[in-house]
Image (cartoon, rainbow, N blue to C red):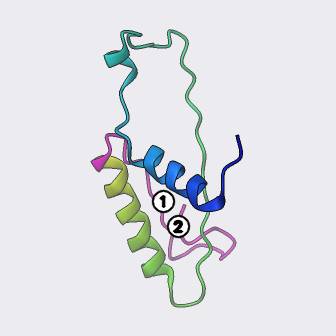
Amino acid sequence: MEFRRRQFLHLTATAAALPIVPAAALGQGTIIPTNATMIVERTQYFAKPGLAADVLDLRRKACAVRLSIGLPAGEILVKHPSGDGSEPDVA
């Protein structure tokens, strides 16, 4: 069966608009891992001169978004004023 581009786009838009049914509603239950592993990732942000406060503000907003979706906020580390300059502005 061959689809034209317009038909294909219409089908994909329809599929994207369908409600997503959670797995528990399908009778599959919830899978809880017994041997969960925590992955720790540290991102370092080196801001352009004068923009360190903006980067810090953006990281704080990102933490608020994480909290709103039920994830832990994480930690924000800020460069110490007496540092040697090799450390990131925000981590």
- Crowd band around label 1 with a 10 angstrom C-alpha radius: few (<14), some (14–19), many (20+): few
At x 44%, y 13%, the residue is 32
Q: Is the Cβ of the residue at disc 1 closer than 8 Å to that at disc 2?
A: yes
Q: Position of residue 2 (x, y in %)?
A: 71, 46
Magenta highlight: main SS: loop
Q: Earlier in the sequence, mark 1 or mark 2?
A: 1
Furthest residue in direction bottom, as rendered? 50
Question: Is 38 left or right of 56, judged from the image as shown?
Answer: right
- C-alpha span from label 1 to label 2: 6 Å
Q: Establish if 27 lies above or below 43.
A: above
User: Which numbered tag is attached to residue 77?
Assistant: 1
Q: Position of residue 61 (x, y in %)?
A: 35, 65
Question: Is 51 left or right of 86, judged from the image as shown?
Answer: left
Question: Is 38 left or right of 5, judged from the image as shown?
Answer: left
Q: Position of residue 64 (x, y in %)?
A: 31, 57
At x 50%, y 55%, the residue is 10
Q: Quadrant of the N terminus?
A: top right
Amino acid type at circle 1 is: Leu
Could you say which is closer to the camera, residue 20 or residue 35?
20
Determine whether the residue tagged by mark 1 lies in a helix, strand or loop. loop
- Crowd band around label 2 with a 10 angstrom C-alpha radius: few (<14), some (14–19), many (20+): some
Q: Establish if 34 lies above or below 42.
A: above
Q: What is the span of residues highlighted in magenta in the rendered image?
A: 68-91
Amino acid type at circle 2 is: Val
Furthest residue in direction front, as rendered? 1
Determine whether the residue tagged by mark 2 lies in a helix, strand or loop. loop
Is 76 colored magenta in this rendering?
yes
At x 50%, y 76%, the residue is 81
Is 36 colored magenta in this rendering?
no
Residue where numbered disc 2 is placed: 90
Could you say which is closer to the camera, residue 6 or residue 45?
6
Question: Is 10 left or right of 8, judged from the image as shown?
Answer: left
